[in-house]
Amino acid sequence: MARVLLVGKGPPDVGGIPTFLHMLQSSSTGRHQVSFLNVAHHGTPEAGRITQGNILRTCRDTWSVWREARKSDIVHIHSALTPAVTVLRAGMFAAAARAGGCAVLVHAHGGNLQSWVSSRKARLTLKASMIPAQQVIAVWQVGAEALTEILGAQRVRLIDNGVDTLRFSPAFSAPPAAVPTVLYVGLLTPRKGLLDLLESSRLLTARGVKHQLVLVGGTPDEGPQARDAVLSAAEGVAEIRGRVCSSDMPGLLRSADIFCLPSWWEAMPLSLLEAMASGLPAVTTNVGDTSRAVENEVNGFLVPPNNPGELADALERLLVDEDLRQQMGEAARLRAVEGFSLDVLLGSIDSLYQEAASLGRRRRS
């Protein structure tokens, strides 16, 4: 049994990484002894910036990683790996874990990685920061390809995100809604395409297409100013529900009719997979690996980012056609079950840990 230390942002943070970490912890099969070091910031978010607070927290967290690594075989670090400040922070954690005698895994979750590494300086920063890591794992194919170009194929592995299709399941007996609900779940920030979605909702209202728009999410890493821009634009257009507990998420998804994720960039978003497993047709932008989950006009619609008009057109097709919503929702559920099973994800992680555990033990001997 390997002793695994997970390192990443948990509560009070929200988003893909905290959700993924919670899933790993709650789905543990007992084959490994898993502990968690939460490096989330409890104050005003300052992610991606060089501030005194971030420097002090990084030094403190790096020491904590080294201390806990001495009691572990594997340190599994979860990071967006973009921008430079975040990459350097992950690199410091990785170096501390190696100094503690562990095998080091870095799990990359950031959907904007491939754009960020377009500069030579960024590529060198990433390459140097990842020297202590034996394996770098990407959750999306485009990201894996970008990492492979910089780090080499032997050090990079693609492991698709997975979803618990028993926990997230459709509301089969739900009566059709008089006014269909379009649901967004994620961080409240313009980079998630929310200003585009709000403009699409205005266009639909002007066309006489009945719907209600519900936005669920918390403050993003870039801080409250990004959230406030969304809240201001949403006034009179959408219902804002803020953060929702993980335990309430399955019921929230079952109460909706359509899921919309209009992001400017993504990796393989867990929120999309959870919605599909819940039997919701999805309208999402064709970014990252969303096209590997959503087949256009089969289980949802893919639209270009930053295009409220095309987003409104796709939403309208589903809003006015209950049969199409049901048909695409069933296809979405099937795709989630067959292509993104939690069991497959956990099996891949288990194999990764078994390989890494021997490295960690050899370093100690």
Image (tube, rainbow, N blue to C red):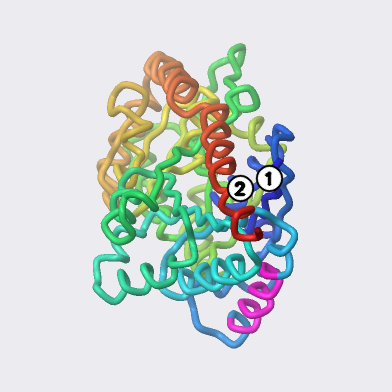
Disc on res. 249: none
Task: Report the amino acid beneath label 2.
Answer: Ala
Task: Report the amino acid beneath label 1.
Answer: Ala
Residue located at (68% from left, 75% from top) = 63
Marks 2,1: beta carbons within 8 A: yes
Side of 326 where 77 appears, left or right: right
Where residue 208 appears, x then y in whole percent?
36, 34
Q: Is residue 177 above or below residue 202?
A: above
Residue located at (41% from left, 74% from top) = 84
Q: Is residue 138 above or below residue 312?
A: below
Q: Magenta residues, as a range?
A: 55-66
Callout 1: SS: strand
Write down the residue under mark 1: 2
Disc on res. 357: 2
Residue located at (45% from left, 40% from top) = 159
Closer-to-camera residue (203/62)? 62
Determine the main secondary structure of the stretch shown in magenta: helix
